[in-house]
Image (cartoon, rainbow, N blue to C red):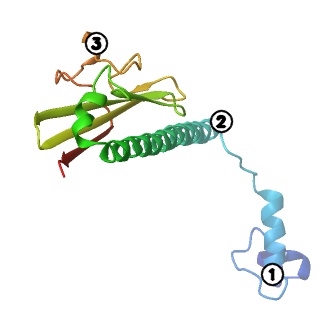
Amino acid sequence: MCCKVGGRKSSKEINCRCCPQKAKGIFANQFSFFHFLSKKKLQAFTIAELLIVVGILAVVIVGMINLFIYTSVAAALAGNKTVAVAAAQSKMEEIRNYDYDLIAVDYASGGVPGNTFLLNQPNGIGTIYIDSTNPDLLEIKIVVCWEDKYNRIIGEDINLNGNLEVDEDLNGNNELDSIVSLVMLFAKK
């Protein structure tokens, strides 16, 4: 019997559709919850919403992969640069401990030990430039170029031979250039 017809609610009519009043009591919420589940249409995501989510995830994943690749290349470059700087510093110390009067001759092209030195890991070459216009002060510049694991040449020495060819001087200063270049002024003692 409905509450509008008889005026009273029985326990079976606790969630009667025709009655606007809500039943009160300990079980009222449970009955209305089950009634809600049984009568409401279940909703799901539409194809359009799923495609949007998949598109956003694809963009994020591609971005993360590119970030990973970029950071691994940058880490390899930093490691190679550290090795190249260490080799250039070692050569600079070798020159500093050499007889001052023989530096300009022995570390010139054709001299012994010469104006180039090799790097084993990474595959590269260092070139030594000596400006001896002032006999009491030598300007020594060491430039290191190398090939990284992606077969890219770091520096202007494209063929890694220590000599400047016509197509290698990109900035027109008549010297090889690289991200690893050390310059030292060495005074006669």
The label nearer to you, 1 versus 2, is 2
Whole-Å distance between the Cαs marked 1 and 3? 91 Å
Residue under the point 13% across and 44% down: 137
Quadrant location, the N terminus: bottom right
Whole-Å distance between the Cαs marked 1 and 2? 37 Å
Q: Where 176 falls versus 70 (above or below)?
A: above
Where disc 3 sits, the SS reads loop
Do the residues bearing badges 3 and 2 touch, measured as CB atoms within 8 Å?
no
Where disc 1 sits, the SS reads helix
Where disc 2 sits, the SS reads helix
State the image quarter where residue 2 is shown.
bottom right
Which mark sits nearer the N-terminus, 1 or 3?
1
Residue under the point 23% across and 32% down: 104
Whole-Å distance between the Cαs marked 3 and 2? 61 Å
Q: Nearer the viewer, residue 73 or 18?
A: 73
Q: Which residue is mark 2?
A: 47
